[in-house]
Image: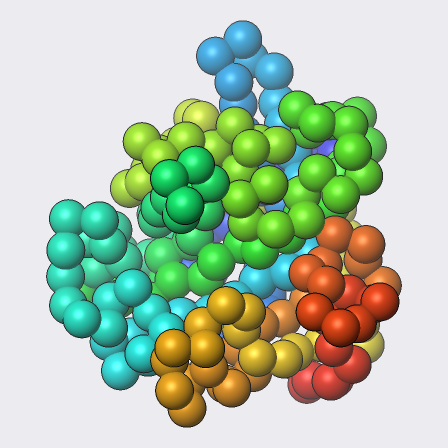
Amino acid sequence: MWRMSLENRLPRSFYERDTVQVAKDLLGNLVVRRMASSRLLVGRIVETEAYHGQKDRASHAFRGRTPRNSPMFGPGGIAYVYQIYGMWNCLNAVTMGIEYPAAVLIRAISQVPSYPLLQADPRAGSGPGKLCRALAVEKGMSGADLVNGDELWLAEGESPMDRSLLRSGPRIGVGYAEEWAEVPWRFWIAGEPSVSRIPGSRLPGTTRATGS
């Protein structure tokens, strides 16, 4: 059943929509990575963050186009991969249209039966850096086509997500973004152990519910 859905790729039109809506709709879908050995690594998306245009002070595009963020200015449905702390890669799906820099950061994934990640740890996909390590997503994949690519793509999940489990809250690690730091553009599936843990809380995420 999972094998059939892995090639049911999200179409270009899925990404060419409002970034916040894409961030919600990515939950429950799959990240698929095909290794050189043909082994497939698969994770179910359980947490995302939206970054929406040059007015968004938390976005890499806020200060304009650079060689690093240039994929954000491309068409919807390509990958934007950047590195933090000189060691952790972060995977984003570019959204909207050409020259409007917007993307969704994939913050966390869960394990998928029959397609283990590179690390067996149940929380191997808990955080954007860890999930890239677990899926062998490399910095050189920035600009890759997530719709037609052979090494990395996003596919429909096995079944629709239960929308009653959708939660939202402020994005993480963007305190420098002034009023934009409190915009509730982080989305997650309630009860998933891979979701980010907020400092001072024993439970993943916060408890704010959101509509679809």
101 up-or-down from 76: above or below: below
158 sits left or right of 33 in the view: right
157 up-or-down from 188: above or below: above
92 sits left or right of 68 in the view: right
The scheme the figure's colours follow is rainbow
189 up-or-down from 164: above or below: above
65 sits left or right of 109 in the view: left
Q: Residue furthest bottom?
A: 179
Residue 79 position within the rendered picture, expressed as x and y whole percent measured from the top left: 37, 46
* Among the 4 quarters of the image, the one containing residue 87: top left
Please name the residue shown 54% across and 54% down the image. Answer: 106
Q: Nearer the viewer, residue 179 or 113?
A: 179
Please name the residue shown 24% across and 54% down the image. Answer: 69
Q: How many numbered discs, if any?
A: 0
Locate the C terminus by quadrant. bottom right
Residue 205 position within the rendered picture, expressed as x and y whole percent measured from the top left: 73, 70
Q: Nearer the viewer, residue 18 or 86?
A: 86
Can the viewer see residue 158 in this picture? yes
Please name the residue shown 76% across and 73% down the image. Answer: 200
Can the viewer see residue 190 in this picture? no
* Among the 4 quarters of the image, the one containing residue 143: top left
Q: Residue furthest top?
A: 37
* Among the 4 quarters of the image, the one containing residue 131: top right
Residue 65 position within the rendered picture, expressed as x and y whole percent measured from the top left: 14, 61
Locate the N terminus by quadrant. top right
Residue 36 position within the rendered picture, expressed as x and y whole percent measured from the top left: 48, 12
